[in-house]
Amino acid sequence: MDEKIKKFLYVNRKAPYGTIYALEALEVVLIGAAFDQDVSLAFLDDGVFQLVKNQKTDGIGVKNFSPTFRALGDYDVTKLFVEQESLDERGLTADDLQDIIYEDEDDDWAEKPSIRIVSRAEMADVMADQDVVLSF
Amino acid sequence: MSYDVNGTSVEHDEEGYITNLADWTEDLANVIAKAEEVDMNEEHWEVVNFLRSYYEEYQIAPAVRVLIKAVKKTMGPEKGNNKYMYELFPYGPAKQACKIAGLPKPTGCV
């Protein structure tokens, strides 16, 4: 297996409910995780709402899939970039987002946060650094 | 298509996964297991119950390698390995155990 590992970035720009984009993106990430690539997720614009904690969807009759983000670490997906400006524009802070952690295999299984808040300029660098960018 | 559990019928899809997750009971699990030719013992139940609590927490049925890793973490390496899990569920620990646990087909099982 000397095939080159590619860097995949899944860009999430839409609110979690109302359209199927957010849920489908997450399913694609989980399925794609089987291929042992370098996977990151980006959350910007209304996509930042996907990570807000304490979501309750009973009133709109759809499944609350936000707990599934916490399973990403089990799938070796440990980089969730969230754009600071998108949070600011929506009156959100890092404290409004759920805690998502992963266990670092190379550091005695220490628990580390998967969410990384980055500026718009840093997000541009993250995107420029990828081999494949998939937008949802 | 449906399973018959003590006279009541429970709908399932063409692969045998139940349609409505709320229909699940332990009796149903035994009926599905019989259809899968799995003879349920304590070890099988341990995995089935583990999957149900994984689903409860994360809202997904894990892919097989994720399941085995998670079992290894919580139940130890003597159970969290391919050999042990495939001996319990010969047609795939994730697929078969999820079916018996009344969960959807695992996400990430291509």
Image: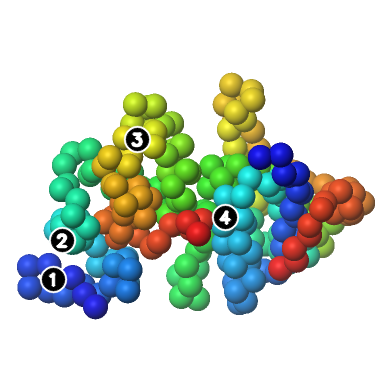
Q: Position of residue B16 (x, y in %)?
A: 29, 67
Q: Which residue is mark 2?
A: B31
Q: Earlier in the sequence, mark 3 or mark 1?
A: 1
Q: Circle 2: is it few (<14), some (14-19), or many (20+) Cα within 10 Å?
A: some
Whether residue A23 sits left or right of residue A14 in the image: it is left
Q: Circle 1: is it few (<14), some (14-19), or many (20+) Cα within 10 Å?
A: few
Q: Give the residue displayed 35% in from the left and 50% down from the top.
A: B92
Q: Which residue is mark 1?
A: B4
Q: Position of residue A55 (x, y in %)?
A: 54, 60
Residue A43 vertical position relative to residue B82 in the rendered view, above or below: below
Whether residue A15 is visible: yes
Both on one chain, marks 2 and 4?
Answer: no
Residue type at mark 1 is: Asp
The Cα–Cα distance between marks 3 and 1, rounded to whole angstroms, is 32 Å
Q: Are marks 3 and 2 in contact (CB under 8 Å)?
A: no
Q: Position of residue B46 (x, y in %)?
A: 26, 40
Residue type at mark 2 is: Val
The Cα–Cα distance between marks 4 and 1, rounded to whole angstroms, is 33 Å
Q: Quadrant of the N terminus of chain A?
A: top right
